[in-house]
Structure formats: C-alpha cells, structure tokens
C-alpha cells in the first residue's frame, strides 16, 4: 500500500516518534524505486507538491490539528521532517540523472548490486563512491564521454575574434588625433529635425539641400511646421548646435557618426556613410588656428611628409570657407608613379581633396546665444569612408558595405 499521512489523535512524544519513523521508512523505499528523471519528477511531486504533497498534508493533519500545548513540539518535528525530505529528494535527482546517463551507455544492469563492468572500465555503484552521489555521476559522465569516442583533452573549437571594420577603424583613428589635441567626443541622434539640420546652420528655406532629391525625410510630416519635420541627418553638424546650446565657450569637440543622403549607390556614393566633424569656439580664434590644426591632423594621419593646401569654397554655416587638399601620399604629390604611369588616386594632379572647413558664420551664433563680437571659431568635416578608400587603396565604396568577409579580412 502506498504511504498515506495518518491523522494523529495522540500528540505525545512517543506517538510523534513512531509516526516520523513510518514516514521516513516510506521515504527511503520510494526513493530506492527512482531510476530515471521521469520517476524522480513523480517522486518529487508526491512528496513536495504545494496542493496535495505529503509535506503539505503534514501541516494540515499534524500541525494544524495539534492542540495548543503541543503545537511547538509538533511544529519542530514537522520542520525536521521537511528538511529531511527536501534533502533526500534533491539527492535522488542527482542519482536519477546518473541513471539516465548510465542507461545511454547500456551499463544499467547491476548498478544497485555492486560494480558494473563496461567495455572501457568498471563503474562503481553509488554506495561505493566515498565522495557521494555527485562523484559517482562524474564517473558515469566520464565513461559516457569515453564510450562516445570523445577526447576531452583536445582543445575546443575557438570562435574567431572579430576586428574593427576598416571604416570604423579609420574613423577612430581620426577621432584619436583630435582627442590628443584636447577635443572631447560628442554624439547626437541620427533622426533630426529640420531646425537642427538646416535652419540653425544658416541654410535658407530655398536651399537645394532641403529638397527631397537630396535629403531623406520621414514620411507623414507634412502637417508639422517646417522646423519640426523629421529627417535622417545629412551631416553631423546638428551636434555642433546641440553642444553649443548646452555649453558656453570654450568649446572643442569632434563628432563622429553616420549620416544619410538621397544618393543612388555607386562606386563613390552611398545613401549612408560616415562623417567626422570638429568645432572649436573661443576668444581670438583665427583662420591660422584652423590651418595649423588641420595641417597637424593630416600629418598625424598620413605621415609627416604630407603637405596641405587650402582653396576658397562656400558652405552656408562657415564664412570664409575652404576645401583642404593634401599632397597625394601615393605618388608623393608628383601626379605620376615611379614607373611613369599617371597616378589614378589624385587624377594626375598631385593633390587629394580631403575635407571642407571654415570659420563659423556669425549668423550661427545667433541660434545658440553666443556673442559673435566676443567669440570666434572654426569648423571642419570629412568623410571617414572617403579617407578609408584613399588609405586602403579601394576603388569602390560599396565594397565596404556588401558584407563580404573575404574582402574585409584584408584589413585586419
């Protein structure tokens, strides 16, 4: 007959001892019958289930039924039995796991009767392991691995360690140069408002960049005021405005990040690319400071022999503005290679356009509450993808984004 919890009418010490011995005997007998994980689950639920488990019945039939003077002794005895049952059930879980492992090895016969011979050795019974059931489980696992022909001493399969993408690596190198000059790194959202992307940067309402042919606007924005319409930022310059709004001069920041433009992909264009921009605002900053800073940065990036050259240009947010060229680091600024062939990198000119720059237009200061009569500054921006193309001698920007690991492994 399966064990059932008796309803006590006698709560004396002798009666409790007798009932406890009967319960523990049933616990041992049922435990010995567990030989698999499924058996153990039934065993666990029978003794420890919350609704009708034997431990729950002890509370109902013994502790709650005990008269007041006996409740303390009965409660103490129930707690002791609870600890014993919990420990036994957990131990049997380990044994059930071991039986399942051993069964996979077809060595179940005789496990409870002594030692079991296997093709590769002898498996002691659980009782013979002086380190307890867990050590016996370890023996079973070891034999299981041996039976499956696994050599656990062999090194594991290592996952290859990743490396920086060449564009990200280039961008980090650029940022590192300016950090060494004392610039801090700032970042901002890729989804921007028209105000930060255009208006606060001195772009007039009819500027071509505001057209959908050049900029990727978020759909469904027509009902909003122009300055609140959302778009994918076309440059990282909005971070300059955001930074100046929250900081007073002096400001020296470098801004890396992804930008988006409505350009069809080809060898030199991509609708998504990376920029690194910089901004310095303080008292008495001149164009000479701009030239000296960028000349130092280019020499740090491309070598001390690189020369720089500035040509006048136009950008809405800088005045005066310039495009900076560096002497070609492939042909040394000669326009031709040593074999007499024309240098394709610089298109035979000896110079490579590398970035745009200029002094911050005083109109921009009006959007951030700076006094243009007291401060001045310069800004610059370069495409990290373009510099990576030049640095690694790649002739198609799409190769960076096609996800071909064989191509990218060249730059590790």
Image (cartoon, helix red, strand yellow):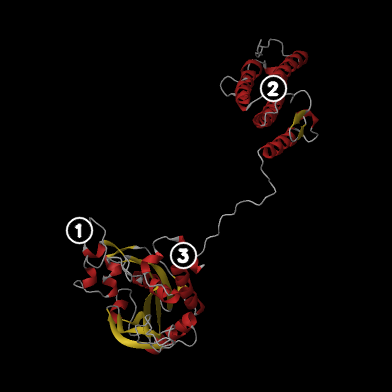
The percent coordinates of residue 153 (x first, y second) are: 70, 48
Q: Which residue is mark 1?
A: 222
The percent coordinates of residue 191 (x first, y second) are: 33, 61
**Residue 363 appears in which quarter of the rendering?**
bottom left
The dot on residue 408 is 3
CA neighbours of label 1 inside 10 A, class few (<14), some (14 to 19), many (20+) = few
CA neighbours of label 3 inside 10 A, class few (<14), some (14 to 19), many (20+) = some
| Distance Cα–Cα, label 2 vs label 1 | 74 Å
User: Mark 3 or mark 2: which is in front?
Assistant: 3
The dot on residue 31 is 2
Would you place residue 57 above or below residue 136 in this image?
above
Say which element carries label 1: loop
In the depicted view, which residue is nearer to us: 86 or 11? 86
Judged left or right of residue 117, residue 275 is left
In the depicted view, which residue is nearer to us: 145 or 269? 145
Q: Residue furthest front?
A: 339
CA neighbours of label 2 inside 10 A, class few (<14), some (14 to 19), many (20+) = some
Would you place residue 397 above or below residue 132 in this image?
below
Say which element carries label 3: helix
The percent coordinates of residue 178 (x first, y second) are: 47, 77
The residue sitting at 48% across, 69% down in the picture is 169
The residue sitting at 78% across, 36% down in the picture is 131
Mark 3 or mark 1: whose residue is earlier in sequence: 1
């Amino acid at each position: 007959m399966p064990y059932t919890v008796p309803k006590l009418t006698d709560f004396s010490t002798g009666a409790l001892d007798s009932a406890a011995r009967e319960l523990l005997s049933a616990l041992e007998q049922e435990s010995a019958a567990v030989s698999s994980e499924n058996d153990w689950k039934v065993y666990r639920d029978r003794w420890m289930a919350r609704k009708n488990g034997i431990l729950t019945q002890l509370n109902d039939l013994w502790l709650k039924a005990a008269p007041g003077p006996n409740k303390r002794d009965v409660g103490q005895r129930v707690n002791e039995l609870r600890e014993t049952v919990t420990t036994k059930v957990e131990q049997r879980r380990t044994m059930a796991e071991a039986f399942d492992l051993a069964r996979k090895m077809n060595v179940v016969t005789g496990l409870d009767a002594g030692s079991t011979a296997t093709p590769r050795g002898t498996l002691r019974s659980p009782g013979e392991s002086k380190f307890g059931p867990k050590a016996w489980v370890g023996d079973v696992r070891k034999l299981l691995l041996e039976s499956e022909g696994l050599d656990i001493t062999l090194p594991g399969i290592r996952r290859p360690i990743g490396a920086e993408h060449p564009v990200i690596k280039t961008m980090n190198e650029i940022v590192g140069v300016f950090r060494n000059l004392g610039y801090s790194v700032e970042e901002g959202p890729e989804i921007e408002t028209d105000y930060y992307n255009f208006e606060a940067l001195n772009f007039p309402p009819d500027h071509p960049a505001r057209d959908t042919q050049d900029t990727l606007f978020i759909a469904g924005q027509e009902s909003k005021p122009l300055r609140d319409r959302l778009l994918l930022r076309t440059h990282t310059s909005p971070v300059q405005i955001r930074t100046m709004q929250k900081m007073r001069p002096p400001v020296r920041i470098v801004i890396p990040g992804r930008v988006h433009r409505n350009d069809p992909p080809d060898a030199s264009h991509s609708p998504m690319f990376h920029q690194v921009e910089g901004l310095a605002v303080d008292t008495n900053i001149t164009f000479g400071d701009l030239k000296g800073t960028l000349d130092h940065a280019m020499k740090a990036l491309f070598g001390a022999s690189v020369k720089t050259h500035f040509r006048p240009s136009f950008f809405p947010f800088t005045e005066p503005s310039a495009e900076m060229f560096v002497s070609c680091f492939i042909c040394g600024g000669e326009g031709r290679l040593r074999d007499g062939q024309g240098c394709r990198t610089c298109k035979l000119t000896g110079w490579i356009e590398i970035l745009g720059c200029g002094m911050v237009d005083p109109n921009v200061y009006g959007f951030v509450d700076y006094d243009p009569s007291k401060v001045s500054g310069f800004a610059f921006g370069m495409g990290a993808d373009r510099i990576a193309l030049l640095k690694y001698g790649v002739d198609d920007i799409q190769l960076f984004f096609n996800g071909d690991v064989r191509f990218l492994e060249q730059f590790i």
